[in-house]
Image (tube, helix red, strand yellow):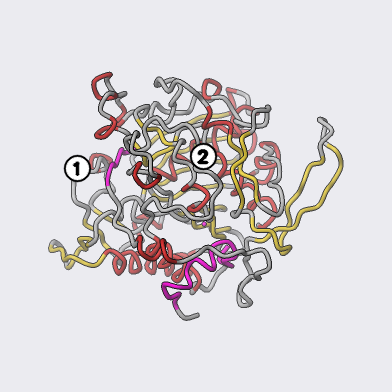
């Protein structure tokens, strides 16, 4: 398939047939002129690509009534319902959040915004509602049975760790204390579920390929990254024999030019998009050569957006995402500086792959959530901000990572739907 040109890339977001804690504060270099000029079309009557086996469309059927009298909905493939296009609905009932911050012992200070002083919890009450259907109700028992005897691994940067912690909290309450454990190592974080002989894991590889910021002491954004664009086997050996692989890479690609290793010690400057494409092609080659698609389901998560400039949403009384308490209204166009050229690059690479992948298209729905970041209620480097630091949100507000409970729980509801009914 030929690459997308700049006028095509928005037309394919929801129907792609590719079936996607360090504290970095930075600005992304984006292509705003493209986003501003290209409308986002109505996808209701569009169809998946013919050459794919993996659309993200789902079919909804009503089944027996649940205990609360509501109809439960299940998701199965091929019917035209795009679960990534919809709106945020404020849910003041009991369905959200899916767990309480105090009830999940595995959360770190990096994401426990209420514990860290956030004065309200409105960000926990928003539910994602697809436009033409409903998401299946998340079921911890269902997911754990699906994972029995298996491994699920998130691979990538700290956003994927954010999501892994969310998933752990969504299931851990039904597991007896003596039957679950959590461990950290240099590259791998593991949640073990003894009764299910299963694990949820996170593997640190912010570029997917190897780089000088892979070691634990180099992960705090103080060193200019040097990327080994064709080297991936050192990481990849740790991804073998995993049943569910969820990859991401974006937030470390923050320079217009990237330094790439040239030879044993020298580095050269390479255009950001060219470097990103080369890295993803190395990753794609590894997946094609090492993943048995009859056993392993592979997902690629699109980029997690930032909200670094309140001027993007015409709010001159705010500083970055600080003190935001509600999402954007459900409007069709948002521009918060997301690098859509990297999005398109990822689409093109994954579309060309020879094995099926699931694309977890979280970008657009997450752009609405300017209210859901950790802001000044984070713990950079594992240390809570002082009151003096909190009073300077322009410098210290983290508008990259997300509070838990919060937005990553929605990503996992979407992932749950794909795991249960597409794998």
At 44% from the left edge and 40% from the top edge, which residue is drawn? 370
Residue 397 among magenta residues: no
In the image, residue 334 sits, relative to residue 103, either above or below, namely below
At 25% from the left edge and 28% from the top edge, which residue is drawn? 392
Quadrant of res 273 = bottom left
Which residue sits furthest right? 64
Q: Which mark is residue 399?
A: none
x, y percent for residue 292? 56, 64
Q: Which mark is residue 407?
A: 2
Is residue 196 rendered to the left or right of residue 291?
A: right
Q: Which residues are magenta?
A: 3-26
Residue occupied by mark 1 = 222
| Mark positioned earlier in the residue sequence (1 or 2) | 1
The local secondary structure at tag 1 comes to: loop
x, y percent for residue 373? 42, 36
Cβ–Cβ under 8 Å for marks 1 and 2: no
* Along the line of sight, the residue nearer the viewer: 288 or 113: 113
Which secondary structure is most common in the magenta stretch?
loop
Is residue 238 rendered to the left or right of residue 176?
A: left
At 17% from the left edge and 67% from the top edge, which residue is drawn? 262
Which residue sits furthest left? 266
x, y percent for residue 62? 83, 48
Quadrant of res 296 = bottom right
* Along the line of sight, the residue nearer the viewer: 18 or 13: 13
x, y percent for residue 284? 44, 67
């Amino acid at each position: 398939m030929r690459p997308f040109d700049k006028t095509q890339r928005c037309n394919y977001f929801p129907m792609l047939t590719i079936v996607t804690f360090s504290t970095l504060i930075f600005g992304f270099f984006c292509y705003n002129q493209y986003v501003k000029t290209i409308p986002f079309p109505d996808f209701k009557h569009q169809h998946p690509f013919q050459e794919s086996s993996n659309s993200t469309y789902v079919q909804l059927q009503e089944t027996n009534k649940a205990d609360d009298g509501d109809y439960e909905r299940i998701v199965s493939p091929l019917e035209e319902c795009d679960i990534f296009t919809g709106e945020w609905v404020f849910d003041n009932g009991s369905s959200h959040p899916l767990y309480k911050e105090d009830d999940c012992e595995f959360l770190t200070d990096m994401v426990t915004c209420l514990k860290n002083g956030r004065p309200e919890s409105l960000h926990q009450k928003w539910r994602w509602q697809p436009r033409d259907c409903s998401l299946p109700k998340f079921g911890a028992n269902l997911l754990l049975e699906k994972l029995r005897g298996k491994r699920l691994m998130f691979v990538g940067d700290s956003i994927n760790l954010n999501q892994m912690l969310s998933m752990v909290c969504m299931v851990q309450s039904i597991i007896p204390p003596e039957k679950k454990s959590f461990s950290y190592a240099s590259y791998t974080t593991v949640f073990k579920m003894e009764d299910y002989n299963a694990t949820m894991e996170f593997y640190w590889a912010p570029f997917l390929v190897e780089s000088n910021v892979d070691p634990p002491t180099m992960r705090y954004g103080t060193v200019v990254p040097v990327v080994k664009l064709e080297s991936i086997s050192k990481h990849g050996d740790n991804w073998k024999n995993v049943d569910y692989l969820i990859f991401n890479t974006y937030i470390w690609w923050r320079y217009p030019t990237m330094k790439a290793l040239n030879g044993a010690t020298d580095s050269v400057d390479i255009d950001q998009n060219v470097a990103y494409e080369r890295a993803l092609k190395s990753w794609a080659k590894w997946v094609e050569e090492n993943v048995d698609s009859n056993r392993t389901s592979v997902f690629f998560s699109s980029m997690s957006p930032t909200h670094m400039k309140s001027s993007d949403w015409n709010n001159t009384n705010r500083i970055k995402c600080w003190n935001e308490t509600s999402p954007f209204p459900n409007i069709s166009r948002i521009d918060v500086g997301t690098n859509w050229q990297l999005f398109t690059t990822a689409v093109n690479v994954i579309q060309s792959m020879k094995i099926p992948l699931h694309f977890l298209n979280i970008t657009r729905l997450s752009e609405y959530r300017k209210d859901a970041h950790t802001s000044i209620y984070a713990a950079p480097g594992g240390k809570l901000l002082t009151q003096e630091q909190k009073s300077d949100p322009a410098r210290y507000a983290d508008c990259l990572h997300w509070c838990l409970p919060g937005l990553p729980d929605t990503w996992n509801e979407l992932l749950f739907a794909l795991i249960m009914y597409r794998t």
